[in-house]
Image (spheres, grey):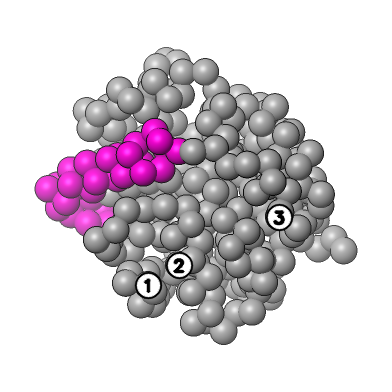
Amino acid sequence: MKSVMRNSIIFLIIITASGISLAKTTGNYANVNGLHMYYEIHGSGYPLVLIHGGGSTITTSFGHILPLLAKTHKVIAVELQAHGHTSDRNAPESFQQDADDVAELLRQLNIANADIYGFSNGGNTAMQLAIRHPEKVHKLILASTFYKRDGFVAGFWDGMDKATFNDMPQVYNEAYLKVNNDSAALLNMFKKDSHRMQTFRMQTFKDWSDDDIKSIHASAFIVVGDQDVIRPEHAVKMHELMAHSRLAVLPGTHGSYMGEEITNDPKSKTPEFFVAMINEFLASK
């Protein structure tokens, strides 16, 4: 069971997938830095940008809590390069480029600044947005993210090395095909994403410096699960480095506290509790 869960968590980081459906969703596209970039807007109020995890989409990362967030915020949910509906380009993926893409999308939408919520690798993109485009960031929500390789639990990097297409959970396989009914495209996407994640983002990921994290001056809410692939001690270190941050260690695994598709527990009330915490943080002075 532990090996199955570990493979599932690894593919939450690596592969492209799409899961649950949001009722009456109407997506939009913008031409952003060579991408045909997909985004959705839900609700009204101060803008809250949602940035999904590695290999995921809007719905797999945020589908369970997006309707709750949209009750009090203008939610702008994006899909990054080569993920979900968004096109690819002839360039490697990087957290820095993802941040530039989100900043350009906000410019095109005439949004001067926004609250930014990034999950997993989306948290890395959110931090880079705060570093590279601080004028675009009001507050940050950083869920299960990292800035150094040792932020992960023991064995994570070995698992990344050994992951293959055959390990891909069937739920992700089926979910992708609902978005793009092309099995060849699914295999190609897996190969391209896993290669890029291993070569350009993860396996040769170079630690960010403590000064990089200290340079983030936006108020930040740092969240991690007590059984996450991110070590709680790493989240504590991030909290210590960010002058205007709050920290929560919630019961759960990687994203289960927010209802992420593969780790979601339908009986859990934690995602509703988490949304209440988000709303309180964003409403605070």
Q: Which residues are magenta?
A: 177-205
Query: Which structural element holds mark 1?
Result: loop
Q: Is residue 62 magenta?
A: no
Above-or-below relation of 184 to 84:
above
**Main SS, magenta residues:** helix
* Residue that label 3 marks: 216
* Three-letter code, disc 2: Asp
Residue closest to the eye, 278 or 147: 147
User: Which badge, 1 or 2, comes first in the chain's sequence?
Assistant: 1
Structural crowding at the residue carrying mark 1, measured as other residues with C-alpha within 10 Å and reported as few (<14), some (14–19) or many (≥20): some
* Residue that label 1 marks: 33
Q: Residue at x 71, y 55 (%)?
A: 216
Outermost residue, right side: 285
Q: Is residue 125 left or right of residue 247?
A: left
Image marks 1 and 2: residues in contact by CB distance under 8 Å: yes
Residue closest to the eye, 185 or 31: 31
Q: Is residue 186 magenta?
A: yes
